[in-house]
Amino acid sequence: MGGHMGGHVDDRREGVHEGVHEELRKALDPAVRGTVDFSPAGRALVTMDASNYRRVPLGVVAPRDADDVAAALAVCREHGVPVTPRGGGTSIAGQATGEGVVLDFTRYMNAVTGIDPQERTAVVQPGAVLDDLRAAAAAHGLTFGPDPSTHGRCTLGGMIGNNACGAHSVAWGTTADNVRGLDVVTYAGERARLGQGVEGLPPRLADGLRALADGHLALLRTGFPVLPRRISGYALDALLPERGRDVARAFTGSEGTLGVVTGATVRLVELPRARALAVLGFADEGGAADAAAALLVHGPLTVEGMAADLVGDAAAGDLAGDLPAGAAWLFVETGGATEAEAAARAGEVCRSHDGPSRVVTRPGEQRALWRLREDAAGTATRLPDGGEAWPGWEDCAVPPERLGAYLRAFRELLAAHGLRGAPYGHFGEGCVHVRIDFDLTSGEGVRRYRRFSGELADLVVAHGGSLSGEHGDGQARAELLPRMYGPELVALFGRFKDLWDPDGGLNPGMLVRPYRLDENLRFDVLPRRPVDVEFGYPDDGGDFGTAVRRCVGVAKCRETARPGAGVMCPSYRVTREERHSTRGRARLLHEMLAGEVVTDGWRSEEVREALDLCLSCKGCRSDCPVGVDMATYKAEFLNRYYAGRLRPAAHYALGGLPVWLRAVAAVRAAPLVNAAASAGVLAGAGKRLAGVAPERGIPELAREPFSRWFARRPPHAAPEAPDVPEAPDAPDVILWPDTFTEHFAPSVGRAAVRVLEAAGRRPVLPGNGICCGLTWVSTGRLDRARTVMRRTLDRVAPLLGAGRPLVVLEPSCAATLRTDLPELLHEDPRARQLSVSVRTFAQYLEEFAPDWEPPRIDRPVVGQTHCHQHAVLGDAAERRLRERAGLTGELSGGCCGLAGNFGFEQGHYEVSVACAEEQLLPSLREGPGKLVLADGFSCRTQIGQLAGRRARHLAEVLGEGVGRE
């Protein structure tokens, strides 16, 4: 560790220095105007970044300004406590974690404070998110060139700390190439403005930097490899007199070890008016890598490469029309003043390639391809067979002309160690990303990781490369820097660090005097045996611990300006608090299993409070690149947390809703219940007893349940049915009478029957009293859910022979039957049979009545795609059916905010409304004369209560059209 501070760090890790904790907190509270959080939850949220490493801090400070930063540093210096600056926490080498105080810049110091379009510069605070800067610059036709795949959540301070690059550094360079000036505070409290030259620096620092460079001119001129992606180590060659003694450039990429950035002036570049994408197919990644360097003569914006083992079969199928034939591809983006010019340049690239190729000009197709590439940091953590893969050798780089040879040797080295990984990355600059299936949970696996790391470092150096080509060295590679630079230059790195930080107080253990690459692994603290849980976790070997560590920290859940129909993570998007993000909740569950910071296990209040605002929307199941399923984890936690305890009233009232509604229907008391629900005083008392938010109206019960109507309706002569394969004399389709359609919205069921019969199908109901178990799952009453599901299987399974489909009109119930039921009853083969039979209304019509023509409605629409539909079922069939019916326009993405019982529970109303205001309500205001569609009962209820408009299920709209024909 650096200076005398290292002793403090080592002592703290041995438990000797724990007394500092409370004393430090009491000193920081009055010293800073920002937030001081030494709580277990606050500390647990920042124990990890997106790397393999974990360190437990004493506390977290969110400063409001540079004065707060200086004050916090002064207190920490007085107490001998190290400090780690942190942005979005997406660092992949471990440099955004620390054992002292973590400075969180994302809460307050997150603004783009100025854009100068004439000078083409911007002034930003360290916590500003890159996409916010790009949006502000785009108004002037400009952008910030470096664009990591985490651009929707990474911060400028983190980019400066790591010298981040991104896909477009081929055209616009690294962050260091685009920094014009930095405002920093050192651990000793010195403030400085960094730029070219040493003028304006504190004299001690100015003299020391000049002497260090001038005393080692030959070493600085010859000791650094020449390649576009040399990120490893300190950029001491920027201090050479012929390079203008560029102190800002030398500081960029220092990983928070020299000083704390409090502001930055950065260069902006002109935004291309049009872009096109040349996609080139190759037989293998080696061929793609061999070709990449030669494409640079075309002046592309980027040259990205990936192979089929990254894309995966499902994604490749979805993009079959966009990807040329091959097992590896290069994405070569071109720009131009017009679409024709950009496309012409892409055409030139394709003509230079003697294999299959395609020019993609439509923005939607380009976005789909780029999303595949940008999500790779997460998707690469799961291999095609479900195996886990981890960073560690995430981004080494070699000269582009050596990339093909390097990749072939890299594949050989993987095979020699019995390891697997899927390389991809910035082939135009020789930078390779890869996640490898290291076993970091066993002693032998960690020893193999260490051996492989040393041999790979030697291989990279043999090819003239850099151990890091984008993400920095951190803990993952700093120990190996002597292999790349030699002992003399590494010793000079130590002197450089000590000039800035003689006390060793800033991010000790990174870059110089580093931690070993195989210590502080985040897996060490997890249970060695599977945790006893209720769900099956089929994609995680049945292990809850494996499911929790699925979150690798890339933090896509923290994006707040994401376009499109993404859902994740609604509560973070409206609160902007890390504990209400999918990553934050996963971190708390990880620490709950570890038991060091969060010490109460399944009774943890910290975890319960974080999960309280989880809407169980399941958005993370599809939107998270690694498929974290927080709704399932929440149900698992609530089941254990409340075991043997009295639950909140809403868990009984709303969780047991199907039972109460069946009882009301049995005695035909719906009118009486509706009257009571509309009586002010009586309704208020009832809501208090049931744990329902007082602001909520109680939905009106139908006078006649759907199944009762179905049983008494007159016989209907259905049209001739199309020829579909099924069992002889069997009903065409089983129509599921879900609780919401049955008791609240039987009009949806009646309309569905009308449409199905018009399509030549004969629906049948499986009987009364069946239930998917959704309300018990969402409240964590899993024993009861399992009982309900088994009873349902007993009644429904006999009807499911010969692959007969089961149409479920309510998306949340369909999603429960598709996922929760087989994962809770994983030992029952009937559960899988029922799960695969589930179809939405539109999916059934498309698959089993493909020749039926829906009525033409020809109306513009607005509304809501149910979050469970988005996450589990998909809505492609619904989109196609709407198009065939002439229903034009897009439905809102995001989450409506009601989310079943969530929006009805006391304490959730404000968050529920804020979620609706995020996308849904604005879309309704923009389309006052449009038809409102929402297949989910929760969505229709939220729209009715907050917007005063009636929303209808697609079946209802088509049913009305059928009735008019």
Image: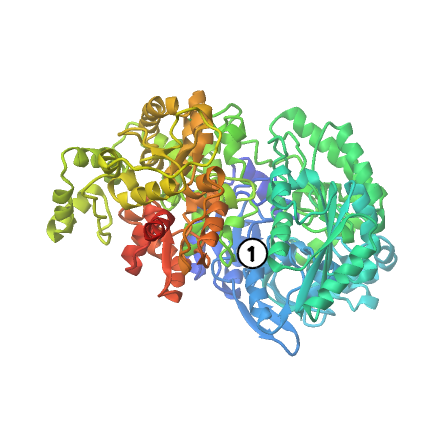
Q: Could you tell whether 160 is left or right of 224 in the image?
A: left
Q: Nearer the viewer, residue 136 or 222?
A: 136
In this rendering, the answer to whether 354 lies above or below 413 is below
Report the residue at 47% width, 30% height from top.
Answer: 836
Q: Nearer the viewer, residue 408 or 460?
A: 408
Report the residue at 54% width, 47% height from top.
Answer: 100
Q: Quadrant of residue 253?
A: bottom right
Q: Nearer the viewer, residue 626 or 671?
A: 671
Residue 911 position, x and y percent, is 35, 53
Q: Could you tell whether 830 is left or right of 51 in the image?
A: left
The three-letter amino acid code for the residue at tag 1 is Gly
Q: Name the residue carrying label 1.
A: 152
In this rendering, the answer to whether 844 lies above or below 141 is above
Q: Secondary structure at mark 1?
A: loop
Report the residue at 63% width, 57% height from top.
Answer: 159
Residue 399 position, x and y percent, is 82, 50
Residue 188 position, x and y percent, is 60, 59
